[in-house]
Amino acid sequence: MSAYDDVTDAYSQALDPEGAGLVDPVLTGLVGEVTGQDVLSLACGQGQDARLLSRLGAAVTGVDASAGMLDRAREHEAADPRGIAYVRGDAQDLAPFADASFDGVVCHMALMDMPDLVPAIRSVARVLRGSGWFVFSIVHPCYHPHVEIAADYLVDHRYAKLRPPDWLPPHAYHRPLAAYVNELAGAGLHLERLVEEHTPGRPDDAGSVPGLLYARAVKAA
Ligand SMILES: C[S@@+](CC[C@H](N)C(=O)[O-])C[C@H]1O[C@@H](n2cnc3c(N)ncnc32)[C@H](O)[C@@H]1O
């Protein structure tokens, strides 16, 4: 049972209900040219990022822990087949996948939903081929308006979101920025780029304060 099983319908109504695929210029820019590449959409949810990757020309596999979210992803795939395979699995072991299965892994807005970062990043490194790339986005660990970080910034902890919309689970996991950077390095993933992005159009957007953090890292050849 995943926390997202409780919000599956509302999430799918709120995000990409028509199934066109995620629109995210920052993520798309970090992913780059992927035509013909084998790409894993990690914690794919109802598949909006998998559909984006497919639109970019990749051969896509999506994996998620939530059976409900995967049902929605498969409904979109049945309505508009793109050849995306959806698999139920835990990002913290990626057991369904052999070593060196993918040219790239994308994890959009999900690492902060996982209680344990270390096995998730290690699993990404394991399933990547040499020179493979990893692009992820997360709620910014320093600045997001839904997160009260000032008191316990350096402490890994599960937090209650301040004003979660009803299509998101009410809790997530905070860890400091250094945990992400150091764990990438420890797993042999060389950090190429970080992007800090605010979220225009949101009523709680602070304008010059980044609510999101994106990263691209590459495995040694
Ligand atoms: C905020 S949603 C993002 C979904 C999708 N990437 C998107 O952008 O729409 C977070 C997703 O992470 C998944 N998730 C959380 N923990 C997971 C884990 N340990 N293994 C696999 N998926 C997980 C949830 O089921 C959920 O679908």
Image (cartoon, rainbow, N blue to C red):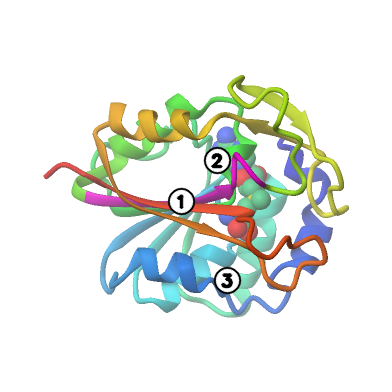
Q: Is mark 1 within 8 Å of ligand 1?
A: no
Instruction: Using residue 6 as the reference point, say whether residue 73 is left or right of it.
Output: left
Q: Residue at x 61, y 40 (%)?
A: 142
Would you identify the image quadrant in which residue 39 lies? bottom left
The yes-or-no answer for disc 3 within 8 Å of ligand 1 is yes
Q: Is residue 110 shown left or right of residue 169?
A: left
The quarter in which the C terminus is drawn is top left
Question: Is residue 64 among what the camera can see?
Answer: yes
Q: Cβ of disc 2 within 8 Å of ligand 1?
A: no
Earlier in the chain: of badge 2 and badge 3, it is: 3
Q: Position of residue 172 (x, y in %)?
A: 70, 35
Residue at left offset 63%, top offset 62%: 208
Residue 193, by quadrant, is: bottom left
Instruction: Write down the residue under mark 3.
Output: 22
Q: Amino acid at mark 3?
A: Leu
Q: Please rate how many residues cluster around mark 3, counting C-alpha atoms within 10 Å: few if below 14, some from 14 to 19, many from 20.
A: some
